[in-house]
Amino acid sequence: MTRRRAGFTLIEVVVALGVMVLIASLAWGVLAGTFKARDFLERQDVLERGARVALDRIDRELSVAFLTSNTSAVNTYRTVFIGRDEDDADVLWFATRAHRRRYANAHECDQAEITLWTDTDPTDDSGGRLALLHRESQRIDEKPDEDGVIQPLAVGVTRFDLRYLDPITAEWRDEWDTTGADTPDRLPRAVEVVLTLVGPDPADPDESVERTFVRTILLVSAKAMQQSLLNSGQKALGDNQLGGGLTK
């Protein structure tokens, strides 16, 4: 009597290999999608973290901006708060009390001059994006837009737009100049900062889209909003009615 040996036929082996290849391809597709999602989330997190860090520093310095009322003292210069409207690339320079000493016993105070402006982004080969630059000078002098240390706050910028809330008229201005006739020697009550950065497209991580971040910063040294009567008979908005956009 002949005994048959147990085993797989050639057809069974081919079918098993085909099933294994199908499972492997499906698993690779899932892994590839996971890797793309991970890369997208990482780039998205870098974008949001960069915007948050830049806005946090602007917030910290701008909220304690000040003007020197007494300029007759020795070695005292007139401080300014000047914001220029340059479409989507505004410029702002001001004096602040937010300077931080990096070294113990350093002969520095909390006052400094700050300038915010945009310039060509060195990391962008196309030349269509900007870099948000920050200049800080530990010495306040008659040249508020010169000297100091320059550092980039953000790259991939397509818009840096500022607006200033007038506490007297309760209206937003595109420019502010404490040396001019419209707003002489007084600070805006709040500053709205609009920062647009280029980030990954949620629909296609290989493409880029613009993301806009907005923050409204209250200046603690500015005069409070005045309660004046309007033609309609209702009062103007006060500080407690400015809305939830204020960060302070």
Image (cartoon, rainbow, N blue to C red):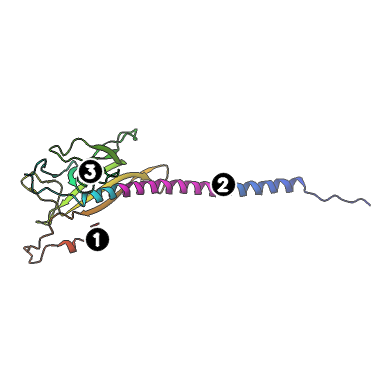
3D distance between C-alphas at marks 3 and 2? 59 Å
Q: Residue reaching furthest front?
A: 105
Find the magenta span and give its range.
27-53
Mark 3: few/some/many CA within 10 Å (<14, 14-19, 20+) = some
Circle 3 or circle 2, nearest the eye: 3
Q: Is residue 49 magenta?
A: yes
Q: Is residue 214 left or right of residue 7?
A: left
Q: Is residue 11 left or right of residue 135?
A: right
Q: Name the residue: 22% across, 37% down.
A: 148
Residue 2, percent from left and from top: 92, 50
Disc sitting over residue 244 in the figure: 1
3D distance between C-alphas at marks 3 and 1? 35 Å
Q: Amino acid at mark 3?
A: Glu
Residue, disc 3:
108
3D distance between C-alphas at marks 2 and 1? 47 Å
Disc sitting over residue 28 in the figure: 2
Earlier-in-chain disc, 3 versus 1: 3
Circle 3 or circle 1, nearest the eye: 3
Earlier-in-chain disc, 3 versus 2: 2
Q: Amino acid at mark 2?
A: Trp
Residue 139, percent from left and from top: 18, 40
Q: Is residue 93 left or right of residue 234?
A: right
Give the SS element for disc 1. Answer: loop
Circle 2 or circle 1, nearest the eye: 1
Residue 43, percent from left and from top: 40, 45
| Residue 201 shows in the view | no
Earlier-in-chain disc, 2 versus 1: 2
**From the image, which quarter does the C terminus lie in?**
bottom left
